[in-house]
Amino acid sequence: MNSKPYNKRKIINDPVYGFITLPYEIIYDLMEHPFFQRLRRIRQLGLTTMVYPGAYHTRFHHALGAMHLVTEALATLKTKGVEISDEEAQGVTIAILLHDIGHGPFSHALENSIVKGTGHETLSLMIMEQLDVQFNGQLRVAISIFKDEYPKRFLHQLISSQLDVDRLDYLTRDSFYTGVNEGVVGVERIIKMLNVKDDQIVVEAKGIYSIEKFLIARHIMYWQVYLHKTVIAAEFLLIKALKRAKQLAEGGVALFCTPMLHKFLYNDFSTQDFIKDPSLLKAFSSLDDYDILTSIKVWQEHDDSILSRLCSSLINRKLYKVELQTEPFDAAYLDTVKKTAQMKFALRNEDIDYFVFSDTIENRIYNKEKAPILLQYKDGSTKEISDTFDLFNVANLTKPVIKHFLCQLK
Amino acid sequence: MNSKPYNKRKIINDPVYGFITLPYEIIYDLMEHPFFQRLRRIRQLGLTTMVYPGAYHTRFHHALGAMHLVTEALATLKTKGVEISDEEAQGVTIAILLHDIGHGPFSHALENSIVKGTGHETLSLMIMEQLDVQFNGQLRVAISIFKDEYPKRFLHQLISSQLDVDRLDYLTRDSFYTGVNEGVVGVERIIKMLNVKDDQIVVEAKGIYSIEKFLIARHIMYWQVYLHKTVIAAEFLLIKALKRAKQLAEGGVALFCTPMLHKFLYNDFSTQDFIKDPSLLKAFSSLDDYDILTSIKVWQEHDDSILSRLCSSLINRKLYKVELQTEPFDAAYLDTVKKTAQMKFALRNEDIDYFVFSDTIENRIYNKEKAPILLQYKDGSTKEISDTFDLFNVANLTKPVIKHFLCQLK
Amino acid sequence: MNSKPYNKRKIINDPVYGFITLPYEIIYDLMEHPFFQRLRRIRQLGLTTMVYPGAYHTRFHHALGAMHLVTEALATLKTKGVEISDEEAQGVTIAILLHDIGHGPFSHALENSIVKGTGHETLSLMIMEQLDVQFNGQLRVAISIFKDEYPKRFLHQLISSQLDVDRLDYLTRDSFYTGVNEGVVGVERIIKMLNVKDDQIVVEAKGIYSIEKFLIARHIMYWQVYLHKTVIAAEFLLIKALKRAKQLAEGGVALFCTPMLHKFLYNDFSTQDFIKDPSLLKAFSSLDDYDILTSIKVWQEHDDSILSRLCSSLINRKLYKVELQTEPFDAAYLDTVKKTAQMKFALRNEDIDYFVFSDTIENRIYNKEKAPILLQYKDGSTKEISDTFDLFNVANLTKPVIKHFLCQLK
Amino acid sequence: MNSKPYNKRKIINDPVYGFITLPYEIIYDLMEHPFFQRLRRIRQLGLTTMVYPGAYHTRFHHALGAMHLVTEALATLKTKGVEISDEEAQGVTIAILLHDIGHGPFSHALENSIVKGTGHETLSLMIMEQLDVQFNGQLRVAISIFKDEYPKRFLHQLISSQLDVDRLDYLTRDSFYTGVNEGVVGVERIIKMLNVKDDQIVVEAKGIYSIEKFLIARHIMYWQVYLHKTVIAAEFLLIKALKRAKQLAEGGVALFCTPMLHKFLYNDFSTQDFIKDPSLLKAFSSLDDYDILTSIKVWQEHDDSILSRLCSSLINRKLYKVELQTEPFDAAYLDTVKKTAQMKFALRNEDIDYFVFSDTIENRIYNKEKAPILLQYKDGSTKEISDTFDLFNVANLTKPVIKHFLCQLK
């Protein structure tokens, strides 16, 4: 055995799973690429740290974790006789490693303010295509699986379905780092229960309780973490600050900026622009949390009083006060709140929205229309899982839940 | 500080909570009493070890664990301004420590075969009364709380309700020792969310997700552990073996026995007998897992072929084959199975039931009629928790679930 | 895939490692054998539960755990290019599964009282030989590895050396179940660092800190658990009770006994007897904790006041008071203590030893004479590990530590 | 109970300890202060994430964790009869909360390059003094304890000694987030073993194994994490990059900078300057990881080829190759390496040091001269702990260990 491959079979410490082993040389090489290294500087949960101070884990770590789970899942499937070639195994491993590589910093905020019109899935795919060129076509199978064009469709389901390793890792990892134990999922058990039937991922019937636990964990993580009132408050403060900055930039006002952020703040790029100009993708791929938060910090002292107030509110954690309810807010009430803010902060009509606004959040625990979870019984038959629940209210489990919130700066 | 109380403030290692501190001198003295030491020799989960080989934890440990949680709960309630005197705190602590002291070995099996007619709650109370005499009346408050006769009724709820420290500890402990992570409950968080309103235990509204998790954990532990097919198979094998032994004893057949077991095998005692003759309670209190399993082991070689077969099946883990379903078994099918067994084992009609039988198991996740869980909102109002669920099917959550099973020895 | 092997690739829940998968059909069959099932009824740590009430785990579970670790170790070695045939892998797996199968109940106590002269290693080997016959020679490689006669000697080292999977599992498992976190060992990391060089197991040099941790954990577990004063007190109480029973039996006194215990209590068998009479091995293989503790419980009421006192002291946890020191006890002091006891309990001279005695315990953290731990550097060279320590006092680490203790019943 | 204090008794999720409760209103207010909020943006372990991708935890979280442990320690001491007034308890709690508040981003790097001459302890004290003014003198006791001027000296020892809550938290937290389980410490047990004797913190003798474990954990964390070769490589790359930037700034070269960093890059401030000009402290208190890493990112494109190379090496993780040894490097060897680099990178003599250099790292596990650890025996006597070890090489444990390393950019 020569030393080079040996060096690339790295073992990485992971507080969640213990150790993560890199299964292929190319995984090591992809991990070393600046596109992937950037994910070290992008937190998985953005501003959730405002509520859960342990949750600074990064997209880099999530990508490695999901890759670890795919490796485990492939090993399980193989022992059950599912045929998976080395090329396919490598393909699906690369695909999950890179599935989030198109995420920008504070993705939700960015896509709502500065980089509009091109979603992170599109960007992930573009980056994979670019890496495929650099790696002499070694990513073809991965891309095919990622786009769900690969004949064995269960490989795509492993990385993108109602029960994929993406969800399994992020629920596990996010609950670990937030300390919200209610979100812990029996990941190891679920993976050991996986099988393939008619080119679809299925779960052995005795794994049903683990799936119930998985769904309730997902439900809890949404309301207790991802859509926590204070998290919403922080994220919308960032969205509004970036929107204001963009508005000022469009008006020609000077703003402290890193060169990368400057490019996106002072220009509007369409997906077509990304396609035409590959350097744009490289520029995007150097943006990270540091560009954003550093600018926010500096903008605390900006002359524009709206921008400076939004930014210092965020930095010093004087967040929006948030009300959350299932019904839309009463127009008259909203109006009163806006009026009060307008007077208090001496706002022009068109600026009120930075201080008071209402919007909605949505969440769906389980979408049975889209790669649903199938249980497999001992006789080989399968059943879509929501047909088997007796404890859950299936209607509520499978439909999107919409909540209305009202934010106001005090 | 004199040395005596110091010595009795023992710290006990507990893999589940880290350390358990004995909060009162009398707790140490009660723990040292032979009645309580016996619990070291009674497993919490009986024959569940046949499926989960890690689950050898004892009722002794559960009692200490529940006591630890009551101590934590009392501390939380006090910081929220709930008035609890030292005498009351000690009372509720004693009550939970002793709440299961009337359990016999393999309780379910025993109460279905040898010690019929006197449930463990009755025996627990009798033992507490006897200890109260020995401890010069120091258990009065504890007994009053245990019987729900104490004026502050929330103290009883702490130890006996839909969300009591008994359930919190056993779910946590059983999931820990079985390794069924799906049963893990956010015990620490639930306890921190407790409060008292109108003399009832309530949970702060933001604890709702922890309660959802608690209920689903309970659901999962029932079907995955407590009512696991193989656990049922083992427990009913023990019931049948003990029934056969009892039948033989009644017929005057000699059976190897410890003296304690002999007393209960060759006699039938009513609750009245226990009341009249205190030595009976003492005899009962020396019965433990060792009397039972040792006899079963020896009976493998007994002349009665039914007894010996049942016993060796249990010891060598050749358990009943179990079928489990929601509907009653078809009479004709049951009949066929019985006939087959009768021929195979050359059984008399009246003995078939030892080899083939059908019965039911029942489980109710949450009984809203009986000390239900109340959520408390920020405005002080409270609501029974099942009114607030959207994810659960409340009807199924709150009604008893009955399943039918059929056991046959092969 | 036919259904039979599938059914035998069981997954077993383990609180320590999550899941344990049975890697071969024969492992399932061996596990089902009564010889192995008996290990369910033999605690790994005997009376240690008197101090650590969580430590009821069994030899059954330890055997499965060590088997799990060997499976992991084999997988690691294979990825590093070490050649191991399927037959060898199965052999070493069987060998570790059965390595402790010759243990009697409360082994230390039994070997000091009732079953003298035939150690558990000898009995393990005899049982393996008997199983080999029953399994048509399928255990040949396992036995050869167990006896260190197999050419690839590193396979024996995996299961018996200063850093074998036996130690790795029991340290991990015992610290888990006692709750003594100081004993936790980085088992996963150590296994990933293993390699083979010149037919010897070596550890990659960067694993040195894990080894240091392993040695200190071993040191701590010895003094905090295995040789804890109260554990000694309980174990010697059992030894003395069994010795007394044996003495009475030799004098023809009747004692309550299970048939199996009766055989060994009323007879003395040599290793030759075991070899000559295979039924003896079967009898031994039906002895477990239940025979012993049940008898002890019954003997509390025996007419012999010494036996009954020893037994009730054990059952009710009124253990010997123990003094522990590095020097032998002063003869005059010992004499005084004995005299006092003699008067208090009205003892004959020859019986004092049941109430007061002094003895020694011994422990050696690391024996560099016997399959020592080798570190392997990047250049391929190896070094015996104690040559590399700077933090440890190597002399004290490698020599046996002897402590003297004095027990007295109060 | 009025609502205000209620709202400030926040419960914060912590993956390490479960929950952290804020014990005093003023703790909440201090936590909300921008000086403290800044710690959210300063990682505890700087660039250690280059090796351990889970280790993004912040000084904010460590400060809360250490505060939690002090609360636990105070509770333990009180139950043992140690007199601690509410004012003192609050004082020591504030002192530990703020003990690291003077740390800059990447402290080690910064103090070696940009903010020279004023250590973080000095800055912590200055900030506490400033907060004391803002909080109307409520920090007097805390400051007195922090400076070790408070009469009850054991309070200072709780937060600063060889076994203080600072070390206990950071070892626990750092091992948790890195996933290096070898560093786990039995924090709960150690705290339960604390007592006070003659105004000094002592540990009950039976806690000795926990202390041994603590020392070995410290040893392991130093060599496996804090002084890991790759961590050194990353930290020195940052130091060199900042030094180069400072050199360029002194030469009047323009550099992208946040305003806060600009202040410190283009000026040299002495401790006297900090004392004279309070605004300087405020400026320092707005510096965080984001200023530093953002600048490093931008400097990748700087005209100065040395600066740009150092910065892009750091960002893209092409770190120094490091050799580590106990002896100083041979001068001739060092010279050759330097010559090679000079040719390869076409360096001027005075710039070689940015590419190749040797330096030392130092570590001392246990300093018995400075607030040593005292064991307390049952007779009340105490002993300095290193006198009691037999397993450790005390000389090596207590003396500083110095290692030499050589870094070269490839």
Image: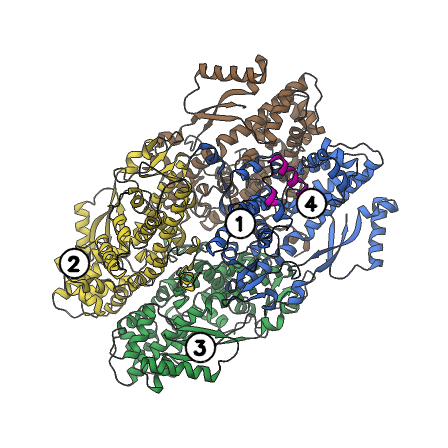
Chain colours: A green, B blue, C brown, D yellow
Is residue A405 shown left or right of residue B118?
A: left
At label 2, the amino acid type is: Ile
**Residue B54 appears in view:** no
Is residue A297 shown left or right of residue B377?
A: left
Q: What residue range appears in magenta?
A: B117-142
According to the picture, the residue beneath numbered tag 4 turns out to be B120
According to the picture, the residue beneath numbered tag 2 turns out to be D275
What chain is tagged by disc 4? B
Give the spatial CA distance, label 4 vs label 2. Answer: 74 Å
Q: Are marks 1 and 2 on the same chain?
A: no
Give the spatial CA distance, label 1 vs label 3. Answer: 39 Å
According to the picture, the residue beneath numbered tag 1 turns out to be B69
Secondary structure at numbered mark 2: helix
At label 4, the amino acid type is: His
Task: Indicate whether B231 appears above or below B25.
Answer: below
Q: Quadrant of the N terminus of chain C?
A: bottom right
Secondary structure at numbered mark 1: helix
Q: Are marks 4 and 2 on the same chain?
A: no
Is residue C138 shown left or right of residue A100?
A: right
Nearer-N-terminus badge (4/1): 1
Secondary structure at numbered mark 4: helix
Is residue C28 shown left or right of residue D188?
A: right
Q: Looking at the image, do the residues carrying marks 1 and 3 touch, with CB atoms under 8 Å apart?
A: no
Q: Which residue is pictured at 59% across the width and 25% down the height? A: C118
According to the picture, the residue beneath numbered tag 3 turns out to be A406
